[in-house]
Image: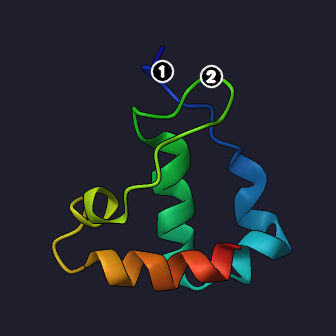
Amino acid sequence: MARDHARIRLDMWTDDDFTDLTSPAQWLYINLISTGGMKYCGVTDWRPARIAGASVELTANDVEMIAQELE
């Protein structure tokens, strides 16, 4: 069952691991945790083209490259 809301940790903005990420990596992280497709157990589909569609300037390849930083 898909979620209809997401709990976002407000302290991520003071977490060095998060603030050390580039802004595209921060965007991807927030996108992944807040999209409607994520299940309650934290699992979501990995579809770079669909994720890229949430931004006018990104391609699937861009999403793949940004994801490498999150790995």
- Element marked by disc 1: loop
Is label 2 in contact with label 1 (beta carbons under 8 Å)?
yes
Find the residue positioned furthest to the top.
1
Find the residue positioned furthest to the right.
16
Query: Which residue lies under the disc numbered 1?
Result: 3
Mark 2, other Cα within 10 Å: few <14 / some 14–19 / many ≥20: few
The earlier-in-sequence mark between 2 and 1 is 1
Task: Return the x and y of residue 38 as percentages of the image width and height.
Answer: 51, 34
Q: Which residue occupies 45% across, 20% down?
A: 2
Is 20 situated left or right of 36 in this image? right
- Element marked by disc 2: loop
Q: CA distance from mark 2 to mark 1?
A: 7 Å
Picture layout, residue 27 above or below residue 47: below
Q: Quadrant of residue 68?
A: bottom right
Q: Which residue occupies 82% across, 66% down?
A: 15
Q: Which mark is residue 40?
A: 2
Task: Return the x and y of residue 34 as percentages of the image width and height.
Answer: 48, 42
Coloring applied to the structure: rainbow
Q: Which residue occupies 62% across, 32% down?
A: 7
Is 34 situated left or right of 20 in this image? left
Task: Return the x and y of residue 5 as percentages of the image width and height.
Answer: 48, 24
On-image quarter of the C terminus: bottom right
Picture layout, residue 4 above or below residue 52: above
Q: Which residue occupies 56% across, 70% down?
A: 26
Is 42 situated left or right of 47 in this image? right
Instruction: Identify the amino acid type marked 2.
Output: Tyr
Instruction: Identify the amino acid type marked 1.
Output: Arg
Is 11 situated left or right of 63 in this image? right
Q: Which mark is residue 64?
A: none
Q: Quadrant of residue 20?
A: bottom right
Mark 1, other Cα within 10 Å: few <14 / some 14–19 / many ≥20: few
